[in-house]
Amino acid sequence: MNHPAKFVVVEPGSSNSKFLEIRVYAGEEQLGFVYLVLGDGAILLDIIHVDSRYRGRGLGSSLVEEVERLARGLKCRRVHGEVTVNDYTSTPEKRDVRAEWFRKRGYSATKQPDGDWVIEKDL
Ligand SMILES: CC(C)(COP(=O)(O)OP(=O)(O)OC[C@H]1O[C@@H](n2cnc3c(N)ncnc32)[C@H](O)[C@@H]1OP(=O)(O)O)[C@@H](O)C(=O)NCCC(=O)NCCS
């Protein structure tokens, strides 16, 4: 990564779309993204992903901070999501590790009967 990370909010479709994406770039290269859905007073953090070559450098944490900044700007009071086996965390163990990752970033993480996790943070 030769450039400082740059965060870009992408609004597909019309400007009042309820779907949003934040991408992180170093120069022209995209290093990661987070997909969001705007709800009523809350933002659903649907998928977060950082290129495996660039993990462990704080980009994921910064993406989450950008989500929270955006949420506050939109007067949302909550960010929430799920950590499931259907996303990039393909094994139950990784699911638990990822829930812990969110917990360290101030999210509550509640395990569901099926082993998935509900994560949320009040802003
Ligand atoms: C979850 C994810 C977005 C985090 O991105 P990231 O840029 O690595 O995040 P950070 O650098 O802020 O934090 C990484 C943590 O792992 C540690 N770490 C160190 N080296 C690492 C490496 N090579 N790879 C991953 N994590 C590493 C960091 O120390 C940090 O630990 P901490 O939780 O104790 O602070 C990324 O791992 C990812 O894309 N995973 C696959 C997709 C996924 O599981 N998404 C979540 C469900 S949708």
Image (tube, rainbow, N blue to C red):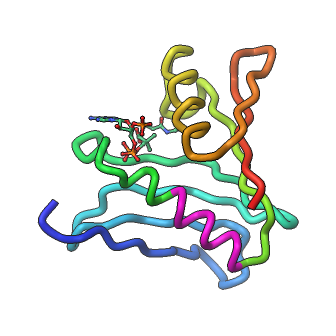
- In the displayed structure, would residue 68 be above or below residue 79? below
Q: Which quadrant of the view contains residue 23?
A: bottom left
- In the displayed structure, would residue 85 be above or below residue 14? above
- In the displayed structure, would residue 74 be above or below residue 67? below
- In the displayed structure, would residue 43 be above or below residue 83? below
Q: Where does the magenta region start and end?
A: 64-73
User: Where is the N terminus found, in terms of image quarters?
Assistant: bottom left
Q: Is residue 72 magenta?
A: yes
Quadrant containing ligand 1: top left
Q: Which sits in the foreground, 19 or 114?
A: 114
Q: How far across and down, in percent of the image, does residue 94 sit?
A: 49, 21
User: Where is the C terminus found, in terms of image quarters?
Assistant: bottom right
Q: Is residue 14 left or right of residue 54?
A: right
Q: Is residue 100 left or right of residue 118?
A: left
Q: Which quadrant of the view contains residue 16?
A: bottom right
Q: Residue furthest left?
A: 2
Q: Is residue 19 left or right of residue 31?
A: right
Would you say the magenta stretch is mainly helix, strand or loop?
A: helix
Which residue is pictured at 51% across the width and 74% down the height? 10
Q: Which sits in the foreground, 19 or 110?
A: 110
Q: Residue furthest bottom?
A: 15
Q: Which sits in the foreground, 115 or 10?
A: 115
Q: How far across and down, in percent of the image, does residue 65 sit?
A: 53, 61
Which residue is pictured at 72% across the width and 55% down the height? 79
Q: How far across and down, in percent of the image, does residue 34 sit?
A: 51, 56
